[in-house]
Image: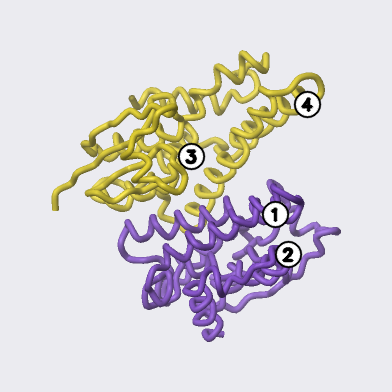
Chain colours: A purple, B yellow
Amino acid sequence: MANEVILLDTWASMFGMRARIALAEKSVKYEYKEEDLRNKSPLLLQMNPIHNKIPVLIHNGKSIRESAIIVQYIDEVWNDKASFMPSDPYERAQARFWVDYSDKKVYDTWKKMWLSKGEEYEEGKMELISIFKTLEGALSDKLFYGGDTFGFLDIGLIPFYSWFYAFETYGNFKMETECPKLMAWTKRCMEKR
Amino acid sequence: MANEVILLDTWASMFGMRARIALAEKSVKYEYKEEDLRNKSPLLLQMNPIHNKIPVLIHNGKSIRESAIIVQYIDEVWNDKASFMPSDPYERAQARFWVDYSDKKVYDTWKKMWLSKGEEYEEGKMELISIFKTLEGALSDKLFYGGDTFGFLDIGLIPFYSWFYAFETYGNFKMETECPKLMAWTKRCMEKR
């Protein structure tokens, strides 16, 4: 079977980054197609008619959508390399839970801080810090969320690092001070590049 | 290993139903603990401190949260019975996508119809019908979403059936007229009881 892999994405998207990291970890060769989100391509509208959103992975003509689902798909198809998923079902459930938690919480809380002033801004800021402290708690003293290896939850969370500068600037706080262990983890992840 | 399984749930919850159906499909014996959501038990707050929500599956003292994640966990742990998941990675990605789609769309759209009047009510109603037509399209001419067998996506979607009466009454439409194939699928699911 021909292995034609295309990623519809836009460079700044943290959700797209998940797909790109997963493809890189599995050494999958693919064609990257940058989308202009103000003028979406007919291919994007055809391949994701439900949400009209990137990222979309197109594998031999079939489209896979939603970043966490794309990462699991890549893991399951290119299974000659080590799995992103923990071998224990409970640890797998935990990894899925924390990716789901970050998807439900981070963006909405950031928007709350970003779009408001006064009390609501302060509330949003405190919530955002608390979310990352919670995620830091889930890391505990491990090297990576996947234990000794970089796994599904690491792939799910590390792209948020690209938002930290905005959080810190707009929220006037330092991730390093609030979440030192999480920041040490981001450094370990960055060394992988 | 002792297999102590407890489900924290409340009878009317469609998300709890997913867990109950998955446990029934795998013939897992478990203790059902009904939660009063206006007065949550210390056990619920301890086992789901992040969201304080049901359902929570407690397996040998460890908690698994979020209904779609619970269903996958049950599938992976009690793997002596047929898997809920399609064997093909693309079909698995599709099943995950449609469960995610229904989680993101149905409740919010129902709320939009339910809490509004006039134009917004009509808009919500049309959107709700369109969501179920989309889900009916994903069923196509198959017996179940899992093909010939009742699988992950069937478990994810069938509990919405318990909301249909409210949709029809409040929206003044008939699911039978709008989505006849989907309704035939609900009947096949109900015959499994």
Mark 2 to mark 4 CA distance (whole Å):
35 Å
10 Å neighbourhood of mark 2: few (<14), some, or many (≥20)? few
Q: Earlier in the sequence, mark 3 or mark 4?
A: 4
In the image, which disc is placed on residue B167? Answer: none
Residues marked 3 and 2 touching at CB (< 8 Å): no
Q: Which amino acid does label 2 sit on?
A: Tyr
Residue A38 in the image: state x and y as whole percent.
85, 58
Mark 4 vs mark 1, foreground winner is 1
Mark 3 to mark 4 CA distance (whole Å):
32 Å
Which residue is painted at 50% across and 47% down in the image? B95
Mark 1 to mark 3 CA distance (whole Å):
41 Å
Q: Which amino acid does label 4 sit on?
A: Glu
Q: What residue type is labelled 3?
A: Tyr
Q: Nearer the viewer, residue A5 or A117?
A: A117
Mark 2 vs mark 4, foreground winner is 2
In the image, which disc is placed on residue A170? Answer: 2
Residue identifier under label 3: B145
Residue identifier under label 1: A113
Residue identifier under label 4: B120
Q: Earlier in the sequence, mark 1 or mark 2?
A: 1
